[in-house]
Image: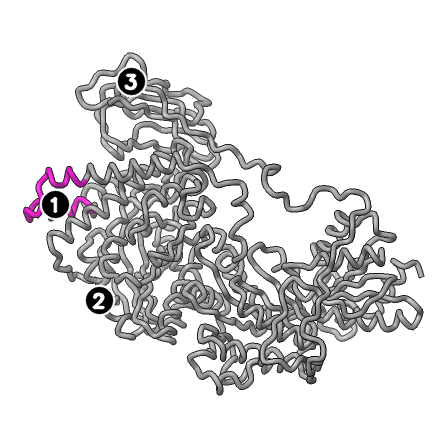
């Protein structure tokens, strides 16, 4: 049977090419792998091979022809002894896959809001039953208890990282875990972030629930490919077949006097990535409830802690088991004059500022996001629609910050409610300096929060 | 430095030899068809064909038991067919259709099968190596005797994370077989232009990992080496490295002008060392099969591949709603 040889696509972007030279002529016998022609693409001159054996019955496009569209018949192949048909067989036309029309799909952002949309309802349900007994605990102890409780409940959970076992944790977060669970489940790794992050992801593919501790998230930069390309994307790339239940945790952001390479907030970085969940607790109760939730979550979770907060004490519910759902912000303080949104250690400055502002009669509503992704935008919008003013507070760099994203959401969905431009307070746009005075200047401060609130409230 | 090259050959039955022929031919015909569909514009983006390397996966798969795991890089179609994944699903993924193994969302480089314990299909060179060790870790943790075949190329062998993984795999006795498919070229850079190391498997010695070089154009040699490596891992002795010397006949991807090697080099290996021809000769000279028997197999394979191509053309594109699914479990 005669078959047409079609102009091939020889690169992902090729639409047409030049048929530079024929290396066979009519009547030649060819076998699979023989070069038929040289074709010039947008990138290079390529040799075009035969895929089947046969005889060149007729050459349809002369050598030297430019602008030959992909899939144009360029020759007819016949079987040995067969005549060339008078009419060439109809080309097998490729159904050009139509580009997905964005407008048919769900759009990332809702359509432009009608004037003065109704305030969304924020979930303000309590995190634990009222009247629950409370005890004072440090963030450090709360994190350890969260891991220990989850490790007791399922054998699939294990911890790996540098100094997590015998040293009891570089920041003592895993203190006591080796004694209770043994070296099989509390695993010291060599200093090799890229490698052990990948092993953790592989173990999660294999059905375990790893907790991978990074001594700090600065070192996770060595492993960021495994976190994003391997952990976050596999569920999607596998059409939903293969998930990755893993927690990457460790201290994040500036500590004190450790300079540029050890002082950086990664909240905005990881929150950029679909497939990841990003958590950044402030209080001990949230650290515990959110870490337990993270360990149970079937998705990869980046859990950003803070070294300065580790030693701080908060009230934690005395319950056998409690978790805090992702995507639910916590309102620490109600107020009607301005909304301050923050997370992690930024909450320290937000709450201090609110106290000071209250002395001057400015009542700030202070919202702790707790999870950056998914983000409780309803809580932010509901509050902004009440206060009409917004200040965001975070330690990360200013460009493409979490605050920038919050601002865009508020602009799209609550523009007409704003009585002042939103202010995004962030760390300064500089690598962290070592000198004590400069370091202080580089970080966001309570004074700056107070000043920003005065600006947006014109008071 | 003494090189150690396995010269062992596995004793196989006529039936198994026929199976090898069939499995290798399926990969070759499938890949040729994929090349055609790419030329027709039905397959887009990157498409890395496995033609020439068929004996590697077919030989090693013959040493695996059903629960063993495998993971590889982006030149992955052969691995999927060898472990029994449906050619229709693989081809339809190449064309980006709903019937593809990843519903059209993964493409040539990203396919998975929980059922067949195939863990991808990874596009970042070297990144699948620690993932493979992690899979092996999960089996060791659970206390079974499964092994994980972790395939990567001579190019990936220069990535740092491979050596981080070697170190931990040996430290923790992980049951992982590191399979270096040395096809002599990392894209367009020959091994000699990328390293002064005389061999790649010997680098394992720095971590105490045993290994050997294997003739990857001889499926029986691959099987013999695989059996040895599997026995080592199953016995709890830790990882093992197989550097399998092979050759890819086609370009790195579809848009490879192939100026880094001569046409004669390719044709010489094709003519003198082809793995499928080798098995064909063994079958015929050993009188295990007649020309007609082999023609029947050729026909059967052609029909499987044509059916796969037909399915891959007919299967619809994924529904637009699929854009928004499978982001979170």
Crowd band around label 3 with a 10 angstrom C-alpha radius: few (<14), some (14–19), many (20+) = many
Q: Residue at 34% of width from left, 44% of height from top?
A: B49
Disc 1, SS:
helix
Instruction: Look at the image and give the residue range highlighted in magenta.
Output: B276-297
Q: Is residue B233 left or right of residue A41?
A: left
Tell me whether the residue at label 2 lies in contact with that at label 3, contact meaning CB atoms closer than 8 angstroms.
no
Label 2, on which residue? Answer: B228
Crowd band around label 2 with a 10 angstrom C-alpha radius: few (<14), some (14–19), many (20+) = some
Q: In the rendered view, would you say A50 is above or below A194?
A: above
Disc 2, SS:
helix
Is residue B289 in the magenta section? Answer: yes
Q: Nearer the viewer, residue A307 or A342?
A: A342
Crowd band around label 1 with a 10 angstrom C-alpha radius: few (<14), some (14–19), many (20+) = few
Q: Quadrant of the N terminus of chain A?
A: top left
Q: Earlier in the sequence, mark 2 or mark 1?
A: 2
Tell me whether the residue at label 2 lies in contact with that at label 1, contact meaning CB atoms closer than 8 angstroms.
no
Q: Is residue B306 left or right of residue A115?
A: left
Q: Nearer the viewer, residue A9 or A338?
A: A338
Scheme of image coloration: one colour
Q: Chain of mark 1?
A: B
Numbered label attached to residue B281:
1
Q: Measuring from the top left, give residue A19's x and y in whole percent.
A: 39, 24
Disc 3, SS:
strand
Q: CA distance from mark 3 to mark 1?
A: 35 Å
Label 3, on which residue? Answer: A58
Numbered label attached to residue B313:
none
Q: CA distance from mark 2 to mark 1?
A: 26 Å
Q: CA distance from mark 2 to mark 3?
A: 54 Å
Q: In which quadrant of the rendered view does residue A248 lie?
A: bottom right
């Amino acid at each position: 049977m005669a078959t047409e040889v079609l102009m091939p696509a020889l690169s992902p972007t090729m639409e047409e090419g030049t048929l530079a030279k024929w290396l066979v002529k009519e009547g030649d016998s060819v076998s699979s792998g023989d070069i038929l022609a040289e074709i010039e693409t947008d990138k290079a001159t390529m040799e075009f091979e035969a895929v089947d054996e046969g005889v060149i019955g007729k050459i349809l496009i002369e050598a030297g022809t430019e602008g030959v569209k992909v899939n144009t018949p360029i020759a007819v192949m016949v079987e040995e002894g067969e005549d060339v048909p008078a009419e060439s067989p109809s080309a097998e036309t490729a159904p050009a896959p139509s580009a997905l029309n964005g407008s048919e799909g769900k759009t990332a952002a809702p359509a432009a809001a009608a004037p003065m949309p109704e305030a969304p309802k924020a979930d303000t349900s309590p995190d634990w039953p009222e009247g629950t007994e409370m005890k004072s605990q440090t963030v450090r102890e709360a994190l350890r208890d969260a891991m220990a409780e989850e490790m007791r409940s399922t054998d699939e959970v294990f911890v790996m990282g540098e100094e997590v076992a015998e040293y009891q944790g570089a920041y003592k977060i895993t203190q006591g875990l080796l004694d209770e669970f043994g070296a099989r489940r509390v695993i010291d790794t060599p200093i090799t972030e890229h490698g052990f992050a990948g092993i953790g992801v592989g173990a999660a593919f294999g059905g375990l629930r790893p907790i991978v501790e990074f001594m700090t998230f600065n070192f996770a930069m060595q492993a960021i490919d495994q976190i994003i390309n391997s952990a976050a994307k596999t569920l999607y790339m596998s059409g939903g077949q293969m998930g990755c239940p893993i927690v990457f945790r460790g201290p994040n952001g500036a500590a004190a006097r450790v300079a540029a390479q050890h002082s950086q907030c990664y909240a905005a970085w990881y929150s950029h990535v679909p497939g990841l969940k990003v958590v950044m607790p402030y209080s001990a109760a949230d650290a515990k409830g959110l870490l337990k939730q993270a360990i149970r979550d079937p998705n990869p979770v980046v859990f950003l802690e803070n070294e300065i907060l580790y030693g701080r004490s908060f009230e934690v519910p005395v319950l056998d088991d409690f978790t805090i759902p992702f995507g639910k912000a916590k309102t620490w303080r109600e107020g009607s004059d301005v909304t301050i949104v923050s997370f992690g250690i930024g909450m320290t400055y937000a709450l201090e500022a609110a106290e000071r502002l209250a002395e001057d009669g400015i009542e700030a509503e202070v919202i702790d996001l707790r999870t950056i992704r998914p983000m409780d935008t309803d809580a932010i919008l509901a509050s902004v629609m009440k206060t009409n003013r917004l200040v965001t507070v975070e330690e990360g760099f200013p460009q493409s910050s979490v605050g920038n994203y919050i601002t865009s959401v508020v602009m799209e969905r609550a523009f007409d409610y704003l009585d002042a431009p939103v202010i995004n307070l962030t760390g300064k746009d500089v690598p962290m300096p070592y000198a004590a005075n400069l370091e202080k200047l580089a970080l966001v401060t309570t004074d700056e929060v107070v000043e920003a609130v005065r600006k947006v409230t014109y008071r | 430095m003494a090189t150690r090259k396995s010269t062992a050959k596995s004793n196989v039955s006529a039936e198994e030899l026929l199976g090898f022929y069939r499995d290798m031919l399926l990969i070759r015909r499938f890949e040729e068809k994929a090349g055609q569909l790419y030329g027709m514009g039905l397959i887009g983006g990157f498409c890395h064909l496995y033609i020439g390397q068929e004996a590697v996966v077919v030989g090693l798969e013959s040493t695996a038991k059903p629960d063993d795991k495998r993971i590889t890089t982006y030149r992955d179609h052969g691995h999927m067919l060898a472990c029994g994944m449906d050619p229709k699903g693989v081809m339809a993924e190449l064309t980006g259709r709903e019937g593809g193994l990843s519903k059209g969302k993964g493409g040539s480089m990203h396919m998975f099968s929980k059922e067949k314990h195939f863990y991808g299909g990874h596009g970042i060179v070297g990144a699948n190596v620690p993932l493979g060790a992690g899979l092996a870790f999960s089996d060791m943790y659970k206390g079974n005797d499964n092994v994980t075949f972790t395939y990567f190329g001579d190019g990936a062998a220069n990535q740092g994370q491979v050596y981080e993984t070697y170190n931990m795999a040996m430290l923790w006795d992980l049951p992982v077989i590191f399979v270096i498919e040395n096809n002599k070229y990392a894209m367009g850079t020959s091994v000699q232009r990328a390293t002064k190391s005389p061999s790649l498997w010997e680098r394992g010695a720095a971590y105490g990992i045993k290994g050997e070089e294997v003739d990857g154009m001889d499926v029986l040699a691959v099987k013999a080496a695989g059996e040895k490596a599997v026995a080592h891992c199953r016995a709890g002795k830790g990882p093992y490295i197989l550097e399998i010397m092979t050759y890819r006949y086609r370009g790195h991807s579809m848009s490879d002008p192939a100026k880094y090697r001569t046409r004669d080099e390719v044709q010489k290996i094709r003519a003198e060392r082809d793995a499928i021809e080798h098995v064909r000769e063994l079958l015929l000279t050993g009188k295990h099969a007649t020309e007609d028997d082999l023609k029947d197999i050729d026909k059967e394979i052609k029909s499987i591949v044509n059916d796969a191509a037909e399915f891959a053309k007919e299967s619809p594109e994924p529904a637009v709603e699929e854009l928004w699914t499978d982001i979170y479990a």
